[in-house]
Image (tube, coloured by chain):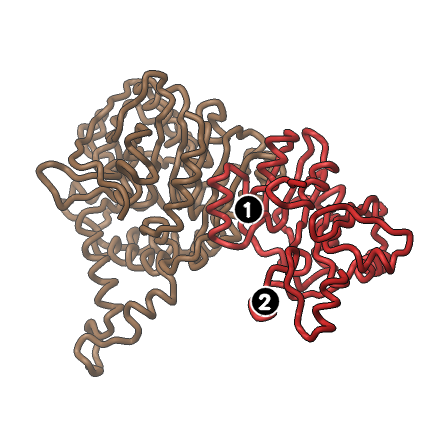
């Protein structure tokens, strides 16, 4: 792997006293955002790149914690000296979004009004709310305009949102494996995931904290389902095929096929640390995402609001947000005469490809970023 | 005579494009033509390219490049979005010849097309000698050629008439990139190694 990791990093916390009015009509009276930064903000404060996380991501994007060397950031392979998001050039910011479960204010943090955890009372948050919250963090860090905002999947949607909500504050946008809005099929998958959580007897209407329990069965199922949609059929075939754990059929409902073993493991692992209420919120944010709604569905008119240069990337095997979905964004940008490049990357990892290390994929991001003006 | 980037058709194309024009280059390769047009003519340019290595090279060149397959049309591009749509030395590699010409004139006001002329006398001589031509403008062996359509200046003009396309300008170049001309179209067909056209259609 070219370049290096950023090494040991630490999280920071910013407290915001000013209430944030949300798309849903709800209000977060005051909130914390946890974030990490890598590299150095230059004197002109012109080299800052915001990395937005996807459904289950967080602020720990790169490097590791000094006391937890195995806890490596979720997009470590693209960030560091000599890597595409080169910390020798850029000041990288990763933030855990509002409603998250990794330290920022969310359903599992205390509601100052009640002294109890927010739980189901935490208001529904939308992508635009995250963008507003991130803008306040940018203010706090003294960043007037991002050199770039980058993200994959739901993270890419935030980059897109940034470009039309704060066109003066984002000079470049990298939108990877995203879509301008979810399809009925996308929403359907999300709803099955939510139903798994909502119907778990341990859910208790979202106030499970008070019952000293967690809807892990529902969350596990939600993650298993989600995970299937992140992978490609080919990749699952290659990785697991019809391999049996014990070589022959056992004619029962225990784990038999390797793919079952893998999914159950992924589900259990995820249900062990992730908050079910956050999962519900994140999937709703995905479902509601549709910036063109403000222009009666005319994405061209929406993208006319943007001023940034765009790199759009999709993956050939991504069936969750197919290349055709990325091309909708490309077409809307082209129709406005915007600077846009589009790469359709042939990687076998389905939607999850955006997290993978690949010489061509990273080469494209690296080359594109090296041409942006700081 | 030296030509832009050793591509004599680029000189001709650059001469037809005015500063500030919006240009789409189909099969833009590493973006050399667009880069030249941006630097020298101040155009606003985008390229379309299918090959990964060329996508990367064009991005390195700072060119807007859209990865796509010309055979599948130009769906991402709106009607009449460009002043010029360029297809340089690529038409002979495209199977859907009529389709791509129609698409070019759907998304652009003008189409600029260059291609190697298979009726060039050296090519014909080569065939008469029993071997497929290999030249400056046809730099491939028959077994590794990306070319799938083999046609001549006169063939192309017959197709333009059939499709009711208007040839606004034509430039015929020999193997050294020098312009050639002749009163007799059939003779000109023998003299030209590379032909560049500027096309429009009735609206």
**Does residue A35 appear anywhere in the picture?**
no
At 31% from the left and 50% from the top, the residue drawn is A357
Q: Quadrant of the N terminus of chain B?
A: top right
At 30% from the left and 22% from the top, the residue drawn is A41
Q: Residue under circle 2?
A: B141
Residue A82 position, x and y percent, is 29, 38
Question: Which chain gets the brown colouring?
Answer: A
Question: Which chain gets the red colouring?
Answer: B
Residue A139 position, x and y percent, is 35, 19
SS under mark 2: loop
Seen from the viewer's position, the closer of residues A70 and B10 is B10
As displayed, is residue A81 above or below residue A42?
below
Seen from the viewer's position, the closer of residues A347 and A24 is A347
Q: Residue under circle 1?
A: B66
Q: Residue furthest left?
A: A67
Q: Give the number of the mark in front: 2 or 1.
A: 2
User: Residue A135 falls in which quadrant of the image?
Assistant: top left
Q: Are marks 2 and 1 on the same chain?
A: yes
């Amino acid at each position: 792997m070219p370049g290096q990791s950023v090494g040991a990093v630490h999280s920071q916390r910013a407290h915001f006293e000013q209430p944030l009015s949300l798309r849903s009509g709800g209000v977060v009276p005051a909130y914390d955002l946890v974030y990490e930064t890598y590299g150095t903000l230059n004197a002109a404060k012109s080299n800052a790149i915001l990395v937005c996380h996807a459904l289950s991501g967080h602020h720990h994007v790169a490097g590791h914690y000094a006391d937890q060397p195995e806890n490596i950031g979720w997009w470590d392979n693209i960030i560091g000296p000599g890597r595409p998001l080169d910390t020798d050039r850029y000041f990288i910011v990763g933030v855990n979004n509002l409603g998250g479960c990794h330290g920022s204010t969310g359903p599992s943090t205390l509601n100052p009004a009640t002294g109890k955890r927010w739980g189901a009372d935490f208001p529904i948050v939308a992508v635009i709310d995250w963008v507003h919250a991130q803008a306040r963090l940018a203010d706090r860090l003294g960043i007037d305009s991002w050199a770039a905002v980058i993200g994959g999947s739901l993270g890419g949607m935030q980059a897109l949102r940034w470009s039309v909500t704060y066109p003066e504050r984002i000079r470049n946008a990298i939108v990877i494996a995203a879509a301008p809005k979810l399809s009925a099929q996308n929403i359907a998958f999300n709803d099955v995931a939510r139903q798994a959580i909502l119907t778990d007897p341990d859910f208790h209407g979202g106030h499970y904290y008070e019952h000293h329990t967690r809807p892990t069965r529902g969350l596990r199922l939600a993650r298993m389902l989600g995970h299937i949609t992140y992978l490609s059929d080919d990749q699952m075939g290659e990785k697991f095929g019809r391999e049996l754990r014990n070589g022959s059929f056992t004619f029962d409902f225990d784990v038999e096929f390797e793919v079952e073993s893998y999914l159950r493991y992924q589900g259990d692992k995820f249900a062990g640390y992730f908050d079910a209420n956050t999962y519900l919120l994140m999937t709703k944010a995905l479902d509601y995402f549709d910036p063109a709604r403000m222009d009666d569905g005319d994405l061209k008119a929406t993208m006319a609001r943007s001023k940034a240069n765009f790199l759009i990337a999709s993956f050939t095997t991504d069936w969750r947000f197919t290349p055709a979905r990325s091309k909708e964004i490309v077409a809307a940008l082209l129709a406005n005469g915007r600077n846009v490049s589009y790469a359709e990357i042939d990687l076998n990892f389905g939607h999850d490809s955006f997290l993978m290390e690949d010489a061509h994929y990273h080469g494209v991001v690296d080359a594109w970023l090296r041409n942006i003006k700081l | 005579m030296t030509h832009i980037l050793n591509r004599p058709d680029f000189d001709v194309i650059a001469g037809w494009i005015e500063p500030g024009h919006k240009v789409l280059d189909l099969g833009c390769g590493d973006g050399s033509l667009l880069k030249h047009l941006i630097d020298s003519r101040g155009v606003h340019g985008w390229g379309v390219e299918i090959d990964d290595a060329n996508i990367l090279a064009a991005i390195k060149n700072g060119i807007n490049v859209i990865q796509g397959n010309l055979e599948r049309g130009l769906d991402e591009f709106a009607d009449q979005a460009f002043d010029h749509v360029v297809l340089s030395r690529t038409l002979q590699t495209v199977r859907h010849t009529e389709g791509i010409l129609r698409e070019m004139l759907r998304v652009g006001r003008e189409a600029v097309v260059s291609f190697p002329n298979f009726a060039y006398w050296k090519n014909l001589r080569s065939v008469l000698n029993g071997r497929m031509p290999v030249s400056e403008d046809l730099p491939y062996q028959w077994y590794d050629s990306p070319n799938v359509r083999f046609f001549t200046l006169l063939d192309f003009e017959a197709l333009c008439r059939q499709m009711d396309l208007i040839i606004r300008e034509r430039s015929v170049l020999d193997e050294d990139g020098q312009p050639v001309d002749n009163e007799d179209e059939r003779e000109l067909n023998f003299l030209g190694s590379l032909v560049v056209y500027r096309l429009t259609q009735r609206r």
